[in-house]
Image: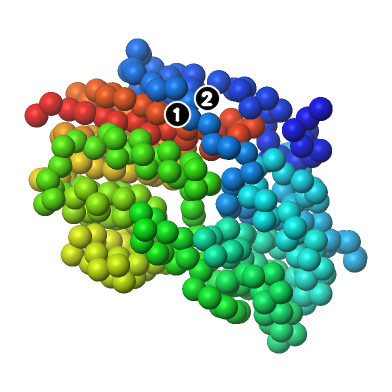
């Protein structure tokens, strides 16, 4: 029996066997392609099922019929979700009332998406609509939030940024005990357990630091790793998304860390840090998007920082970027594969690179 009634139809899972593909082998192979054959790779860290805290659901309307779920494999059709082996237990009970809500909304005509981040105080919901929001829509969304304990519901009308419709409470996540209000629909690590495994491997890979040591963090998001790093040294964080930068900076100031953590908005694809910008850094931590670090990697590889910790969600991008580090004399000190995307072909990795001065 498959792990889910939707397996083979829904495009969310690629395998019915959690142990296939061999995700440790995916990381070993990526490092080998980069020139690091024989690198030390730890055992795979497996994240428990039913812990995923983020989902981007597609919604479609055909007459009075509402489908809410993930897309069919290689199709734009929506598979109406009835179960999921990955999601936090709070998601599935929310789907039937969400379908009722969607059926009543004027701002949803044919196609929409519902992004839900399950935060420390409940479901933070972003509806991407295909028609303008009406006053009756607002009334229904407010009632839904109150009934189902959603701290915030936002709506993005066509070609518009998300607008809060209701905020019953400040929606928060805690990163290293710092409260952060993430942007509506903002990127989060897939599960708290996956985030904890990444953080643990990252901190273990840091060199010996003093209180005034300097860490540069690239692609910092809204502070997922920043505040854990700030417990070890001063952090200079860079991120391209304006709302993520605002969230991290606000959290740092509220926690009294304004002098300890600085967050700067910078598109590292268009305006990467240059070699001289890394001068004096004791370590660099980067967690780039799926495509990898892009142009930033050339300058980082040439800067000669003694310790680089690369968090990756794409073995192919990692193989390319690690190859540039190999060319400039870096060694792999250790590497940790983390399976926080069960039944998929994706693997999260934390790779620690070192270079002698």
The CA distance from mark 1 to mark 2 is: 7 Å
Can you tell which mark lies on residue 337? 1
Kind of element beneath mark 1: strand
Q: Nearer the viewer, residue 118 or 127?
A: 118
Task: Give the residue drawn at x 30%, y 58%.
Answer: 266
Q: Is residue 169 left or right of residue 41?
A: right
Residue depicted at 68% across the width and 36% down the height: 13
- Residue 57 falls left or right of residue 213: right
Asked whether residue 92 appears in the rendered view, the answer is yes
In the image, is 212 to the left or to the right of 318? Answer: left
Q: Nearer the viewer, residue 59 or 204?
A: 204
Contact? badges 1 and 2 (CB < 8 Å): yes
Label 1, residues with CA under 10 Å away: few <14, some 14-19, many ≥20: many
Q: Is residue 342 above or below residue 332?
A: below
Q: Residue at x 29, y 40 (%)?
A: 203
Residue at the limit of the structure toward the top, as seen here:
38
Q: Quadrant of residue 31?
A: top left
Residue at numbered disc 2: 23
Sequence-wise, the earlier of marks 1 and 2 is 2
């Amino acid at each position: 029996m498959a792990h889910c009634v939707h397996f083979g139809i829904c495009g969310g899972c690629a395998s019915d066997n959690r142990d296939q593909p061999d995700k440790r082998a995916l990381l070993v192979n990526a490092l080998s392609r980069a020139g690091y054959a024989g690198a030390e790779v730890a055992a795979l860290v497996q994240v428990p099922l039913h812990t995923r805290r983020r989902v981007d659901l597609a919604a479609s309307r055909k007459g009075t019929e509402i489908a809410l779920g993930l897309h069919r494999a290689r199709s734009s059709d929506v598979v109406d979700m009835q179960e999921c082996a990955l999601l936090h237990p709070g998601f599935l009970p929310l789907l039937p009332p969400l379908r009722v809500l969607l059926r009543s909304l004027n701002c949803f005509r044919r196609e929409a998406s519902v992004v839900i981040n399950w935060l420390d105080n409940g479901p933070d919901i972003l509806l991407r609509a295909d028609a303008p929001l009406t006053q009756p829509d607002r009334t229904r969304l407010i009632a839904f939030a109150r009934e189902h304990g959603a701290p915030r519901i936002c709506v993005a009308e066509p070609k518009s940024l998300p607008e809060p419709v209701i905020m019953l409470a400040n929606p928060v996540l805690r990163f290293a005990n710092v409260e952060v209000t993430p942007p509506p629909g903002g990127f989060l690590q897939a599960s708290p357990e996956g985030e904890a495994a990444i953080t643990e491997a990252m901190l273990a890979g840091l060199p010996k630091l003093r209180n005034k040591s300097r860490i540069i963090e690239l692609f910092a998001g809204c502070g997922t790793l920043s505040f854990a790093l700030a417990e070890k040294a001063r952090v200079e964080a860079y991120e391209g998304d304006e709302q993520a930068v605002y969230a991290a900076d606000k959290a740092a100031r509220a926690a009294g860390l304004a002098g300890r953590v600085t967050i700067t908005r910078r598109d590292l694809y268009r305006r990467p840090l240059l070699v001289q910008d890394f001068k004096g850094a004791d370590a660099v931590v980067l967690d780039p998007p799926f495509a990898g670090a892009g142009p930033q990697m050339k300058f980082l590889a040439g800067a000669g920082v003694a310790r680089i910790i690369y968090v990756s969600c794409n073995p192919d991008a990692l193989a390319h970027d690690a190859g540039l580090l190999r060319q400039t004399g870096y060694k792999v000190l250790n590497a940790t594969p983390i399976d926080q995307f069960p039944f998929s072909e994706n693997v999260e990795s934390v790779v620690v690179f070192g270079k002698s001065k």
